[in-house]
Image (cartoon, rainbow, N blue to C red):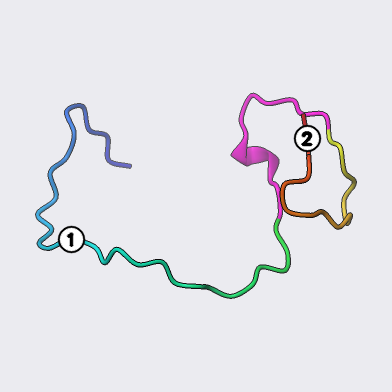
Amino acid sequence: MIKTKRGLDLPINGSPKQTIEDGPRIRQVALVGYDYPGMKPTMEVREGDQVKAGQLIFT
């Protein structure tokens, strides 16, 4: 791992394209506990449940 204290200037020429492209539809996602260190959520859905966009998953 590289640690920096004052930032890092990368010599990258040009700028990124300002476009958004459609990607493939996502059919499944997963929440992994290791991604949320220190959190102790109360789950509002069970493993295997289907959820809708914007639905509450945990509090």
Q: Which residue is mark 2?
A: 58
**Which image quarter: residue 16?**
bottom left
Amino acid type at image mark 2: Phe
Q: Is 53 covered by the magenta stretch?
A: no
> Where does residue 13 sit, x and y in percent of width and height?
10, 61
Camera-side residue of 39 and 1: 39
Horizontal and vertical percent position of residue 3 = 27, 34
Quarter of the image holding residue 35? top right
The span shown in magenta is 30-42
Is disc 2 placed on a helix, strand or loop?
loop
Return the residue found at the far front. Answer: 19
Residue at x 64% of width, y 72% of height: 25
Residue drawn at x 78%, y 45% is 55
- Disc 1 residue type (three-letter): Ser
Side of 27 relative to 5 (left or right)? right
The residue beneath circle 1 is: 15
Up/down of 17 relative to 40, above or below: below
Closest to the camera, between mark 2 and mark 1, is 1
**Disc 1 residue crowd, few under 14, some 14–19, many 20+, Cα 10 Å:** few
Q: Looking at this view, is 41 or 5 the one in front? A: 41
Query: Residues at badges 2 and 1 in contact (C-beta under 8 Å)?
Result: no
Position of the C terminus, as image quadrant, is top right
Left or right: residue 22 versus residue 40 is: left
